[in-house]
Amino acid sequence: MVENVIEVTNLTKKFGSFTAVNAVNFTIKKGEILGFLGPNGAGKTTTIKMINGLLKITAGQIQIKGMDAVKQGKEVKKIMGYMSQKFSLYPLLNSLENIEFFGGISGLSRARIKEKQEEIKTGIDLPVLEQNTADIPPGIRQKISLFVCLMPDPEIIFLDEPTSGVDPEVRRDFWFEIYRLKTQGKTILVSTHNLDEVEYADRVLILHRGNLLVEGEPDQLLKQHNKTSIEDLFKDAIENEE
């Protein structure tokens, strides 16, 4: 039986009187790609940040490989990698400087950081790597962000809308990389508002206004709800909620 790497129970986040995440429950199995689908403001990023210890939870519990994510936060963070939707790289540093900075934070040795800097040069031209990351094309910037996220070789990877604002070719390359990580036994959560992308995930969660509306394998969900596309399933779930 495949173990649950992450178990989220009644996870809730309130900002004053506003409930951003409302008693959400879900699990993620080892080696699974879980797709988080929802419009902007659905609570995807807030949920991811709570799991990663970047936001204090209001109520509920998060277990990561049997550890309490709040009480054992330092241990949990050692096995997780997080690619933020907006802040993944320092914009006024170039890519090689970002690798040096984040590699140091992650505890990589000087020699290992040097290896990583040389490794990225094999896929991206040096003049691009020497530009401030704020000035390079979004698709390349996202590739570098993912590279930085993966430097410590995390077991569990959180990708918050990694393909937002990039062209279809870059989106396809990202999903090739996600599948490659899966073959290595990585556990991956990918958030997106692109309906076509969640079909690539092993399971999908649909969130809206902080509520978990639908959960399951894409093909099974379509059969269960008698829908022919994820788009129809998504629209129906949102309309029923509203």
Image (cartoon, rainbow, N blue to C red):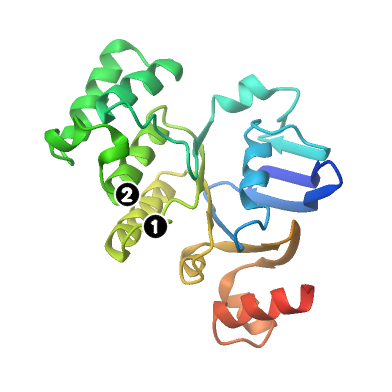
Mark 2 surroundings within 10 Å by alpha-carbon count, few (fewer than 14), some (14 through 19), many (20 or more): some
Q: Is residue 37 above or below residue 62?
A: below
Residue at 82% across / 37% down in the picture?
58
Which mark sits nearer the N-terminus, 1 or 2? 2
Q: Which mark is residue 138?
A: 2
Mark 1 surroundings within 10 Å by alpha-carbon count, few (fewer than 14), some (14 through 19), many (20 or more): few
Q: What kind of element bears circle 2?
A: helix
Distance CA(mark 1)–CA(mark 2): 7 Å
Q: Where is residue 211 in the image (x, y as percent from the top left)?
A: 76, 60
Q: Is residue 75 above or below residue 61?
A: above
Q: In this view, does 168 lie to the left or right of 158?
A: left
Kind of residue sitting beneath label 1: Gly
Q: Is residue 228 left or right of residue 1?
A: left
Residue in front for this viewpoint, 130 or 223: 130
Residue 206's quadrant in the figure?
A: bottom right
Toward the top, the furthest residue is 110
Residue at 62% across / 27% down in the picture?
76
Q: Position of residue 41 (x, y in %)?
A: 65, 56
Q: Position of residue 169 (x, y in %)?
A: 27, 63
The answer to whether marks 1 and 2 mark residues whose Cβ atoms lie closer than 8 Å is yes
Q: Residue 165 carries which label?
A: 1
Q: Position of residue 130 (x, y in %)?
A: 19, 29
Q: What kind of element bears circle 1?
A: loop
Quadrant of the rendering where the C terminus is positioned = bottom right
Q: Is residue 69 left or right of residue 220?
A: right
> Would you say residue 4 is visible in this rendering?
no
Kind of residue sitting beneath label 2: Pro
